[in-house]
Amino acid sequence: MNRPLTTKLILLAVTCLILIPGSIHLYQHRHFNTPIVQGPGVTQVVHLSHYFSGLKGTQADTPVFILQGKKPGGKILIMANTHSNEPAGMLAAVIFIENALVQQGTVYIIPVFNNSGSRTTKPGDGYPLYFEIKTPWGKRRFRMGNRNASPLDQWPDPDVYIHYPDRQLLSFIDARNTNRTWPGRPNGLLMERVTYAAMELLRQEKVDLAIDLHGAETMFPVTNCIVAPEKSIKLATLTSLTVKALEGFDNHVEPSPSKFRGLSHREIGDYSETLPFLLEAPIPFLDQPTGPKTVELLLEGKDPFLLRLAKKKKLFVPYDKTGWPMAKRVGQHCSVILELIRQYSRKNPERAIKLTNVPRYREVVAKGVGYFFRNPEKADREKIVDI
Amino acid sequence: MITIIMIVYYFICAYLAGILFWSFIKEKKSLNNLILYLLVIFPLILRLLRIK
């Protein structure tokens, strides 16, 4: 090698040229926030660390919006972005935060449950870092996150994740999956502390219902459904039948498996008095045999390969050229949450939850998701919370 | 405990990055080795700078 110093300097310069521009995007994504407007129904905003101080100062801490009605009643917790690559639930949560008016009872909303996961991306899958929702006042930009927490916040991964307290052996990656670390523990891994904090919220506030919002592949049988354990299944069935009859969309009921541990719909029910539900809306973006993972695929859910598979009856949801747009998924989440609340309140009038001003399925599909978002630029600064 | 393990891993990461960079400086003959050292050091730097 002639002139080794010159060669090394050139190589170092090339390395920096690749490293720096590539890193800037990842750094900006990790620190990007979306401003959310506290709607007229929001009475308090705390952080999850309010219920367990072990999260304070970590990237896993996340805002909890509280909407308390004047009349005492039941309580419900809505969690979204447990998996941050399934963002329909987060958009539904934002609609609730910015619009809901609670007359009776209390609604707790965590729009980004796995905050760490929402600030990383999936290596190797070419995920977009952001997506935008059109609104009447412009576009609102959100982070596209990953299913699991960032390894910057919880590292290294174990060879096998041993679930606490059941000691079931799970995949190593599930140590960073907040839908495998329930019910959590105060001195465990960071994601176990996140679910422990949520369990503390449920226990301390004596929450009646907990709803965990998700999305699932169209090729996965547990999609377009309400997952419920034994104690919640009657309410889930009533809700499923009602939305099918009155609003015309299918949302079948799946029983929560008792031997598969760590899932919200299993552990919340087993370790608290709360009735848990997990809602799955179809998300073609997550299916393996699709084209490129673009923002368009995320928002519209249209893919020619899935269309061919649908014709061969390989999918578990109806699928045609219209795809499975975001408005349908968000609308389903809104309607199923409202219906679960209505059915619970009907059966438990002393613990009723009454709220208005949240759109149902048909309205979201007709007007679009962004129609229900508030413009942060026109809101009081004090009313803005970054998520 | 997990925090201590994480800190130890960061030290291991810094140690490996240091060895690789030192090897890069000491290498006199092979261009291939120089490129390999830089490629391997990439993820270690990203982790040490807490970027990825």
Image: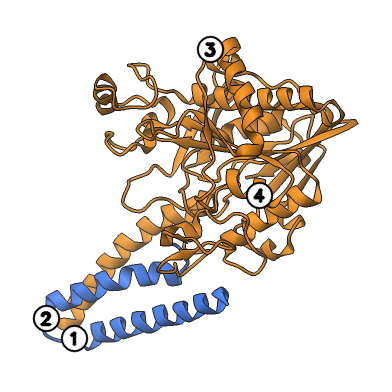
Q: Residues within 10 Å of mark 2 (few under 14, many from 20)?
A: few
In contact (CB < 8 Å): disc 4 and disc 1? no
CA–CA distance in space, label 3 to label 2: 68 Å
In contact (CB < 8 Å): disc 4 and disc 2? no
Q: Is residue A308 above or below residue A379?
A: above
In contact (CB < 8 Å): disc 3 and disc 4? no
Point 60% across, 14% down: residue: A363
Disc assigned to residue B27: 1
SS of the residue under disc 1: loop
Point 55% across, 74% down: residue: B2
Along the line of sight, the residue nearer the viewer: A329 or A276? A276
CA–CA distance in space, label 2 to label 1: 7 Å
* Horizontal relation, residue A100 to residue A8: left or right: right
Quadrant of the snapshot with the C terminus of chain A: top right
Residue occupied by mark 4: A270
Residue occupied by mark 3: A248
Image colour for chain B is: blue
Tags 3 and 4 both on a single chain: yes
Image colour for chain A is: orange
